[in-house]
Image (cartoon, helix red, strand yellow):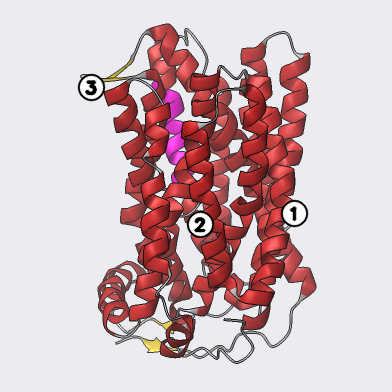
Amino acid sequence: MAEAITHAPPAELDRREVLGWSMYDWANSAFSTTVVTTLLGPYLSSLAETAGRVQFLGFSFEPDAFFPTCVSISVILQVLFLPLLGAVTDYSTLKKRLLLTFATIGASATILLFFVQPDLPLVGTNGAVLLGGFLFIIANLSFGAAIVLYNAFLPDIAPPKERDRVSSLGWALGYLGGGLLLAINLAMITLMEDTGLAVRLSLASAGLWWLGFTYLFPARILRQRPALKQLPPGETYLSQGVKQIIRTLKSIYRKHPETLRYLIAYLIYNDGIQTVIVVSTLFAASELGASADILIILVLLIQFVAFGGALLFGFLAGRIGAKKSIIVSLIIWIVIVVYAYAFMYEIWQLFLMGVLLALVLGGSQALSRSLFSQMIPRESESEYFGFYEISERGTSWIGPLVFAAAVQITGGTRVAILSVILFFVLGLILLIPVNVRKAMLDAGNDPTDVVL
């Protein structure tokens, strides 16, 4: 049996390290914003349309279904890999090194998206679309792996009473950094005559941004802590990681039932959030005929409003608690989906929806992360965040798969977007009865200074 090593959470904030940690959100949000949310889905769809349909190993994909399918594949791989990664990390002093390794792999794959173009030598346009999907799967898998390790630093750098605020700061800086690069990309797409080249340069710039700011800030400032558990004699990190996953699954079921209920609720409602992020630009382009520059302006609006929205929900959590604030955000998410399905037929309506979406986007995700950090045992943070990351931003698989299936069946995205509402409603129903105080006490955490 592995021996847990007690490391108390910090009593005070180290503001320099908090900044270094938060700036990883600034770095990697370029991938989420430019690649996942804005450009890659419509770009691959447009390439696929020129080829007719996407053909792979006898399978034929509708142009608008290919990218959501790639998202689903990348997350199925994460389901298999990320919990093991988290378990291994808790037994080692590799958390920071692995964070940098996966960030480098993901950023490099993103940079290589520059070479995805029509009539690619040797493989043609269909092969270029498949190459783009493959690079995205590698980048998104690496993105998720790095986020597991990044999230697991939160209890290391912030005492319990500060985690809502610190988590919200990270998300806010992420929206600001992602929005800034997207503004640069908008300028390139607007000013350059070759739009395809501008899009490919924008995709590559997201990888360069991710890589550059990772090594400027977290690589230089974050401190690696001692291992949270001691590796038993005769065990390797891999063998012990597999055994620990089995033990943790039993433990969370028997000893942390409220944490398990919360995790299930989160996996469901966050699936809805991630599906909206992934397919929103596809919906706007397909149903409303929004051009690339309109989509970028919309996402820019969302980014900069979301910066304030994340801070606003961090403030709200300090008054009514993180759980109640998340419930408020989920009700607003339901309103957004209904509005998109029933009322959105004009381009100007996109921007009205964008403001409402931005207000809840960062807040619901930042508070979900900080709330979860309060409900898990101190010695198993990386492992628990491995399970958590299965459905973190841009990595859900059920929602995009349901959406892709609906597109395949209906041939359009309007009916498909309505299916997303099920994730928010079910997640809300499961979240409401979760007892946060009991979850904290079961995990050995002190709820005294935490607003519940």
Above or below — where is 245 with respect to 409?
below
In space, the residues marked 1 and 2 are separated at their CA atoms by 18 Å
Which quadrant would the C terminus be assigned to in this image? bottom right
Q: Which mark is residue 282?
A: none
Q: Earlier in the sequence, mark 1 or mark 2?
A: 1
Amino acid type, label 2: Leu
439 or 97: which is nearer to us? 439
Residue shown at the point (42%, 61%) measured from the top left: 428
Label 3 CA crowd tier, 10 Å (few <14, some 14–19, many 20+): few
403 or 48: which is nearer to us? 403
In space, the residues marked 3 and 1 are separated at their CA atoms by 46 Å
Residue shown at the point (44%, 46%) measured from the top left: 141
The residue range painted magenta reads 130-141
Amino acid type, label 1: Gly
Q: Main secondary structure of the magenta part?
A: helix
Does the magenta-highlighted stretch encompass residue 135?
Answer: yes
Residue that protrudes farthest toward the left in the picture: 58
Q: Is residue 222 visible?
A: no
Label 1 CA crowd tier, 10 Å (few <14, some 14–19, many 20+): many
In the picture of the structure, the residue carrying the numbered disc 1 is 308
- Residue 416 pos. (x, y %): 37, 32
Above or below — where is 327 with respect to 309?
below
- Residue 46 pos. (x, y %): 49, 15
Q: Which mark is residue 330?
A: 2
Dot 2 falls on a residue whose secondary structure is helix
Amino acid type, label 3: Leu
